[in-house]
Amino acid sequence: MGAWGTAVFSDDLAMDVRSEYNFLVSINKENSDIEKLLMDYYSDILNCNDPDEDVFWFALSLSEWKKGRLSSFVKEKALSALDSGRDLERWNESGNEKNYEKRKRILNELRETLLSPLPAEKKIKKPTTYHCPWKVGSLLAYRILPEDAAMISESPCSLKYVLLRIIKINRRPISKVCPTEYYNESMLVGLYNWIGSEIPDPKIVENLEFIPMQEYNPPAPVNDIDFSILNSVSEEMKNKIECGITSFFKRRRVTCEYLDWTPVKKIPSHITWLDCDENYQYHIPEFFNTSLSSCPLSNYSSFSISLAKRMEKYLDK
């Protein structure tokens, strides 16, 4: 289960279904069309005795009811799933009695809700999207502000500028089930080996180099680990532990990082556009590993903390 609680929407699948439903309602899709889109997208878990099927109908039915749009078809599917008792059985495990009772109460409340009169139809405001205001190739002066995080207020890098280059802009569609014109953007940035108190002339980058955003140099591996102590655990757990140990002793290098565009109505004052080299739109330097798995996604606060730690050694250069 992808659940972290007993509530209907305390589940990854349920949250995704609700999010998709609410979004499609907000852009004026017909309820029957939304149902078809969702059933097509999640067809691999429907009508095949997949345990997540009941979660799907619970989430969709409650989402529809809350918006005053519960169809008889979805209502019948959800009530049938409740009658089957399959979902509740998943919670019936030794040591899980408290959560079992909680889930039982939640499902009883869901039944009562679905059988109650529908509220009036509710409109949902169209989603707000956030797009990067700069082009690929833009050179940015990024100021590390202490108010971004209390833990960097005493850093020697506080209030200093660093130089970033946008090497890629990633579009993330709002909906996974239906192509629309709605999407958010985040920018993939590279970091130069420079930090200073004033915004420099853009031409300074002609004499600079890119440096990794993050580097992890592990301690020397321990060669005498006795993995026989793991014989008492399951094979799956044993593999996870061995993988974790191996990963700990593996050198990691993050060459670029996605900076999530903060949901504000104007460009943040701590970012200054300096120049744009359009060559980056056609060619990304080999220095960068731009695979999604290699590029963490940061907001401004965590990004500033990372920069403050990374750039200290360049202060005197």
Image (cartoon, rainbow, N blue to C red):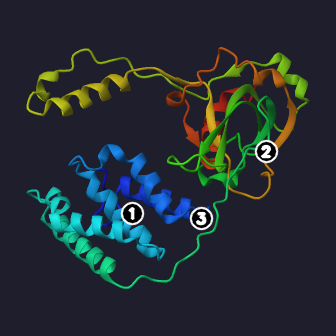
Of the numbered discs 1 and 3, the one sitting upstream in the chain is 3
The residue positioned 52% from the left and 63% from the top of the image is 22
Kindly identify which residue carries mark 2. 133
Rendering coords of residue 103 (x, y %)? 22, 68
Residue type (three-letter) at the residue carrying disc 2: Pro
Q: Is residue 238 left or right of residue 289?
A: left
Judge by depth and name the residue closer to the eye, 44 or 237: 44
287 in relation to 160, above or below:
above
Q: Quadrant of residue 155?
A: top right
Kindly identify which residue carries mark 3. 26
245 in relation to 79, above or below:
above
Rendering coords of residue 305 (x, y %)? 61, 43
Q: Which mark is residue 60?
A: 1
Query: Badge 1: how crowded within 10 Å, few (<14), some, or many (20+)?
Result: many
Disc 2 or disc 1, which is closer to the eye? 1
Query: Badge 2: how crowded within 10 Å, few (<14), some, or many (20+)?
Result: few
Quadrant where the C terminus sits is top right
Q: Secondary structure at mark 3?
A: helix
Q: Quadrant of residue 92?
A: bottom left
Residue type (three-letter) at the residue carrying disc 1: Leu
Query: Badge 3: how crowded within 10 Å, few (<14), some, or many (20+)?
Result: some
Q: Is residue 89 left or right of residue 120?
A: left
The residue positioned 25% from the left and 30% from the top of the image is 241
Rendering coords of residue 86 (x, y %)? 16, 59
Residue type (three-letter) at the residue carrying disc 3: Ser
